[in-house]
Every structure is written in C-alpha cells, then in structure tokens.
C-alpha cells in the first residue's frame, strides 16, 4: 500500500510475480523449488520427467520434511512446452542430463538468467549453450527424495551465486535470486566471483563422495574414522594444489568436513545414493573433474585418478553381475 500525491488515500501496489523455473526436481531441485515457493513474490515452475513426482506435487504441493516441515505451492510439469517465459532458472539435474533438459526448456529462458546448482565442474558451460546469461552456483544444502512429492532436508547450508564469466548474468539478476532464496529460507549470497566457493564445494565433494560411495558410510561416519579422514585430507590437499595452479582461492574443505560431520552426520551423498540404487554416478564431474583439471594445469592428482577408477570399476561390476546372472 502507498499514499497518493495528495497524501490522502491508500493505493494498492500490485507487482507481477517473478517466475522461476527449476529444471530437474530430484532432491536438490525439490529443496530449491520448495523454498522459493515460500517467497511471496515468486511463481515457481518445476520441470521433471518423473510423472509420479510431478503428479504428487500438483495434487498436494511439494512437501519438505527432516530439518524443516512445510508444504510449498509449485507448478510442476513434464511438458516443457507448458512452461511460460521465466526471468530466472535453476538447473539441478544430474550432469549427464543437463544438455537434454536444457534443450527442452531453452524457450523458457530466451531472456533469462539460469543458475547451475549441480555437482562438479563443467555444468555452466553446457547451460550456456541454451541460456543467454548464466550464474555459477555452489551450494551446501543436502537432502534426499522421500517419495513422490516429498523431499527430506538433511542439512541446511549456504548457497553462493556469482557470474559465469564467459557468459555472465547481470549483477541485479544474481542479487535477486539470492534475495528470493534467502526469503524462502535458504540463505544465499550474491558474489562478484563465485569460483572460490565452487571449488571449495568441489574439493569437499570430490574427497568425500567417492569414499562414501565405496564404503557405504555417511558423511559423519567417514569423518570419524582416522584412516578415512586421512584419505579425505589427502584428496583435499590435491585439489588445493590444482586451485593454486589455476589461481583460485577456495574455502578449506577440511573445515567444511568438520562442519558437515555435525550438520549432516547421517547424510548419504548423492554418489552413495546412486550406488545404492545401482545408477551411474557423477564421479566424472567430481573426483574425475578434479583429476582432469589437474592434468590441464600440469599438476598431479593420483588419488583422484585412483578413486575415479575404483568407482568406475564398481559401476562396471553391476553390468558384469547382471550378465553373469543371465548366463546362469
């Protein structure tokens, strides 16, 4: 409400909602869509190909459990053509699905800014093929899908957003998305340069996720074992050398581990969730991504190379076991 120029009357001020489309509403996409749906000025659209999840969201809203308990209004669809133009986007698909998903929704962002909150390295480059302006995102919130239309929040951490330098979003777009997320309950910070924050998250994930995937241990459990803790720290040291070589200054991943042992003790990283479901993992953009960046920078990362090979071997064992069963 506001007064007119004479100061005598109250005049209602109605602004159009900010449309935000979340592309891929697995665990992370669902957390971001649900929290954005709590911000008063936001109209949230969600694109996903899992029909049961889409139907449940449309029937009863998107429910968050665990460290929060609320239901959020979200417009979900598996028909990309049904989504209207959106000013902002968040991509939360698995890395291997980025190109397919973005090709489907490219018309939604003809004049929009799109943030990647995905795991690993190289996702922004793919998003930039389909969106005019791109936001580099790094996140710490963690969770898991608990059923159709339901996501469990395991850990509530910060989100850092900054320009993707080759094809950057405008500063005001980055600031708007950060503000809306914060208002919805996910603290977010707009940064002039988010590369350090991104590499800090990559360093943490690349060091912890493959160990969790290979052992079946949660973040807290592997952090408590001296032998595995030493391996995590050695992997983090390799990533630090890569960052020094490319001129990036990330937060200390070991400090992040200390915090997450407390905040997300029982959380199973997405790579472990994939292994338990016998799905292809994202090791190539996490641990393998660091190994690739190390080669490009002319430094060595033998532990990242070894763990990437071990996870690939585990993935190969599923096919071998299946083929053996068929022969019998």
Image (spheres, rainbow, N blue to C red):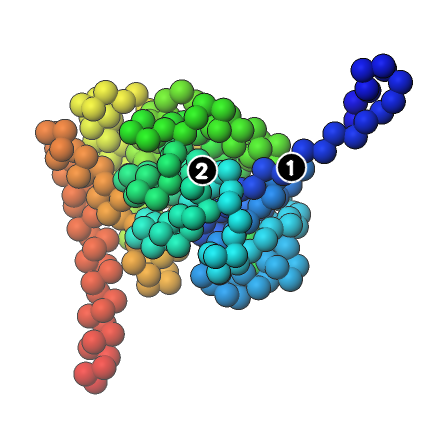
Lateral position of residue 292 relative to residue 171, left or right: left
The mark total stands at 2
Disc on the earlier residue, 2 or 1: 1
Dot 2, crowdedness within 10 Å: few (<14), some or many (≥20)? some
Lateral position of residue 91 relative to residue 236, left or right: right
- Counting from the top left corner in percent of width and height, residue 258 is at 41, 31
Residue at 46 percent across and 56 percent down: it is 80
- Residue 307 vs 313, above or below: the answer is above
Q: Nearer the viewer, residue 82 or 65?
A: 82
- Residue 240 vs 70, above or below: the answer is above
Lateral position of residue 206 relative to residue 33, left or right: left
**For the residue labelled by badge 2, is the local secondary structure a helix, a strand or a loop?**
loop
Quadrant in the rendering for residue 9: top right
Most extreme residue toward the right is 8
Most extreme residue toward the left is 298
Q: Nearer the viewer, residue 216 or 276?
A: 276
Q: Nearer the viewer, residue 233 or 185?
A: 185
The residue wearing badge 1 is 16
Residue at 34 percent across and 55 percent down: it is 100
Quadrant in the rendering for residue 1: top right
- Counting from the top left corner in percent of width and height, residue 216 is at 35, 54
Can I make out residue 136 in this image? yes
- Counting from the top left corner in percent of width and height, residue 58 is at 61, 59
Lateral position of residue 172 relative to residue 256, left or right: right
- Residue 170 vs 58, above or below: the answer is above
Dot 1, crowdedness within 10 Å: few (<14), some or many (≥20)? few
The residue wearing badge 2 is 111
């Amino acid at each position: 409400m506001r007064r007119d120029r004479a100061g005598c009357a109250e005049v209602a001020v109605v602004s159009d909602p900010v449309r935000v489309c979340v592309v891929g509403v697995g665990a992370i996409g669902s957390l971001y869509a649900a929290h954005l749906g709590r911000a008063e000025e936001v109209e949230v659209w969600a694109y996903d190909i899992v029909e049961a999840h889409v139907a449940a969201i449309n029937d009863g809203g998107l429910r968050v459990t665990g460290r929060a308990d609320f239901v959020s209004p979200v417009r979900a669809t598996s028909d990309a053509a049904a989504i209207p133009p959106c000013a902002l986007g968040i991509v939360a698909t698995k890395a291997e699905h980025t190109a397919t998903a973005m090709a489907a929704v490219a018309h939604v962002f003809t004049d929009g800014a799109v943030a990647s909150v995905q795991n690993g390295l190289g996702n922004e480059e793919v998003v930039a093929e389909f969106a005019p302006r791109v936001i580099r995102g790094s996140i710490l919130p963690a969770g898991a899908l608990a059923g159709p239309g339901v996501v469990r929040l395991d850990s509530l951490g910060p989100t850092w957003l900054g320009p993707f330098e080759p094809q950057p979003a405008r500063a005001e777009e980055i600031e708007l998305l950060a503000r809306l997320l914060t208002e919805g309950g996910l603290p977010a910070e707009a940064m002039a340069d988010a590369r350090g924050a991104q590499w800090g998250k990559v360093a943490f994930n690349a060091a912890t996720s493959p160990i969790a995937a290979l052992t079946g241990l949660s973040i807290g459990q592997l952090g408590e074992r001296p032998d595995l803790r030493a391996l995590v720290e050695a992997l983090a040291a390799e990533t630090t050398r890569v960052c020094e070589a490319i001129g990036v200054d990330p937060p200390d991943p070991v400090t992040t581990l200390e915090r997450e042992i407390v905040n997300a003790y029982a959380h199973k990283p997405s790579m472990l969730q994939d292994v338990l479901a016998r799905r292809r993992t994202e090791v190539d953009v996490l641990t393998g991504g660091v190994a690739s960046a190390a080669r490009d920078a002319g430094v060595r990362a033998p532990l990242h190379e070894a763990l990437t090979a071990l996870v690939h071997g585990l993935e190969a064992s599923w096919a071998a076991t299946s083929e053996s069963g068929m022969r019998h």
